[in-house]
Image (cartoon, rainbow, N blue to C red):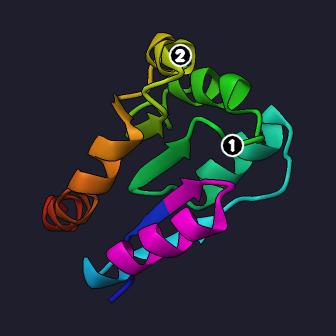
Amino acid sequence: MIEAIVLALISDLYFVSRVRNAAKHAGLALETLDAYKTVLEFLELLHRHPPKLIVLDLNSALPWPEWLPAAKADPRLASIPWLAFGSHMNPRRLAAARHAAADKVVPKSQFIAELNESLRSLNKSG
């Protein structure tokens, strides 16, 4: 059985470990992307290996403000859900993710509280 993939765009190694552990317990594989890619390279990666979910840390140094709208504008990638999280102290980044069409944008505290259940339900959904 091939595990569903969650793609984590998270720079914080502590959080990568936390999300990887939650994904493993939910029966999901976690892949990370920590190197810069152009928009086209990122879209090609998603086409080759479409994840079931993209988890985005809004504090990531990756160029998500370019990647997210480009992925959502691509008809073959638009249905991949994006779950973005960031500090409640930085409402501009939260708003930017909403504006860029992230499917769900939550404060970091809510992300932590809902992580295990969100990944379990994701794996059950398909």
Q: Is residue 60 above or below residue 16?
A: above
What amino acid type is highlighted by mark number 2? Ala
Name the residue at 70% across, 59% down.
33
Res. 115 image quadrant: bottom left
Q: Is residue 120 above or below residue 40?
A: below
Residue 26 in the image: x percent, y percent? 25, 77
- Judging by the rendered image, the residue that carries numbered circle 2 is 100
**Mark number, residue 60:** 1
Name the residue at 51% across, 25% down.
72
What amino acid type is highlighted by mark number 1? Ser
Left or right: where 117 falls relative to 34: left
Q: Main secondary structure of the magenta part?
A: helix
- Mark 1: secondary structure: loop
Looking at the rendered structure, the number of numbered marks drawn on it comes to: 2
Left or right: where 118 falls relative to 124: right
Left or right: where 74 falls relative to 33: left
Front-lying residue, 63 or 70: 63
Q: Locate the N terminus and report the quarter of the image it occupies.
A: bottom left
Q: Is residue 35 above or below residue 111?
A: below
Q: Which residues are magenta?
A: 7-23
Residue 28 in the image: x percent, y percent? 35, 75
Residue 17 in magenta?
A: yes
